[in-house]
Amino acid sequence: MAKTLSSQPLVGITLDSEAAGGWSKFPWYAVRQNYAEAVKDAGGLPILLPHEPEKAEAYLARVDAVMITGGAFDVDPALFGANSRHETVHTKDRRTAFEAALVRGALERDMPVFGICGGQQLLNVVLGGSLIQHIPDEVEAALAHEQPNPRDEAGHDVALNGETLLKSICGAEVLPVNSAHHQAVKEVGPGVQVNAVAPDGVIEGIEAQGYRFCLGVQWHPEFAITPADQAIFRAFVSAAA
């Protein structure tokens, strides 16, 4: 019924989770406000999704699109067939299980899916791809992908590739983006296309054109550093409508 009560598409946004301590003496969920604000400003109605893997189908029956957010954690390398685990890897297994179930179910429904930063990495793994576990150890002369300046400023540029959904949305050859990650897409899954690359060769964007809207970006467009960032959210919400 919820879908019929508003003309605004209902966009499910995944939360991050933290153990007891800090803000609360008990385990807690959190997400930056600008994720929800970016969806709202693009014409969507944001709703936050707690990590309940067994309820993924119930969530999907109620929302019109799914956005997988980032966070200070990593996808378990075992999920993409790695035989070793870098010492920097830190996982949140229940969150990943929930997000993977959500993405699989959304893609089965051809529901719009948008992955941001770690969300792009999770999307690529679900689609059959692999990840670089620690950029400084695998990319020669790598940029500072965990930029020292604030996240609401650009850290480096990305080049947009070919005839892709992302390039058509952004209308640009090169974009300045922020950067807050130590992992990245390594090999893309079957049917997945690279749509953006950093100067050091790190993959910054992916899409699967066999779906209505299946897009991932490695940066954080919710900070709206450029008009192209806002255009990405408008395209996502429009696809959900």
Image (cartoon, rainbow, N blue to C red):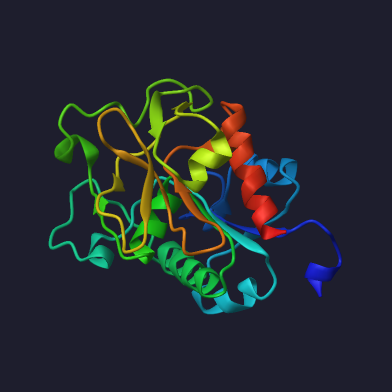
Q: Is residue 100 visible?
A: yes
Task: Locate residue 85 relative to residue 209 in the image: left or right.
Answer: left
Q: Position of residue 149 (x, y in %)?
A: 43, 20
Q: Is residue 240 above or below residue 222?
A: below
For image coordinates 38% across by 22% down, the residue present is 148
Q: Position of residue 239 (x, y in %)?
A: 65, 56
Q: Is residue 21 visible?
A: no
Q: Position of residue 147 (x, y in %)?
A: 37, 26
* Quarter-of-image position of residue 9: bottom right
* Quarter-of-image position of residue 124: bottom left
Q: Quadrant of the C terminus?
A: bottom right
* Quarter-of-image position of residue 170: top right
For image coordinates 51% across by 50% down, the residue present is 69
Q: Position of residue 101 (x, y in %)?
A: 47, 72
Q: Quadrant of the N terminus?
A: bottom right
For image coordinates 37% across by 57% down, the residue present is 192
**Residue closest to the eye, 140 or 210:** 210
